[in-house]
Amino acid sequence: MKALLIKKPWIDYILDGQKTWEIRGSNTHIRGEIELIQSGSGLVVGKCKLVDCIELSHIGFQNNESKHCIKDTSFLPYKRTFAWVLVDAERYATPRSYKHPNGAIIWVNL
């Protein structure tokens, strides 16, 4: 299973159902259920489904603040900006530890 590394507070927004778009500077072709790792914690804290990836224009980024929770929409965060669309986020009652491989910054194979 693939697991996506996400920093606080963004991971909490996803697991609390407030954030459905994870903004990244690259496209992804991965789809389906993934697990969520809180960056720097050594813990797998939840799961969700990655169902789509949309390249965003500046207008699309500005008009969808409620989906990505980024307050400053005056500029795109990346030269090419993508929304990774997440659904059915679920926080685990008991997070579990994992072994972080050297060099992993976006994805971890569990």
Image: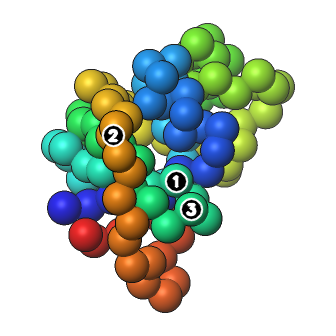
Picture coordinates of residue 97, whole percent (x, y): 39, 66
Q: Secondary structure at mark 2?
A: strand
Give, as a three-letter code, the residue at label 3. Answer: Ser
Question: In front: 19, or 64?
Answer: 19
Picture coordinates of residue 7, whole percent (x, y): 61, 50
Picture coordinates of residue 109, whole percent (x, y): 27, 71
Marks 3 and 2, how far apart at CA = 14 Å
Marks 3 and 1, how far apart at CA = 6 Å
Above-or-below relation of 73 to 29:
above
Q: Secondary structure at mark 1?
A: strand
Q: Which mark is residue 92?
A: 2
Query: Of the residues under marks 1 and 2, which one precedes in the sequence?
Result: 1
Say whether residue 106 is left or right of residue 61: left
- Kindly indicate whether the residue at mark 1 contacts the one at mark 3 (C-beta within 8 angstroms): yes
Question: In front: 108, or 97?
Answer: 97
Say whether residue 31 is left or right of residue 99: left
In the rendered image, is residue 49 in sight?
A: yes
Above-or-below relation of 15 to 28:
above
Q: Which mark is residue 38?
A: 1
Picture coordinates of residue 5, whole percent (x, y): 48, 58
In the rendered image, is residue 59 in sight?
A: no
Give, as a three-letter code, the residue at label 1. Answer: Gln
Residue drawn at (41%, 38%), measured in percent from left and top?
Answer: 84
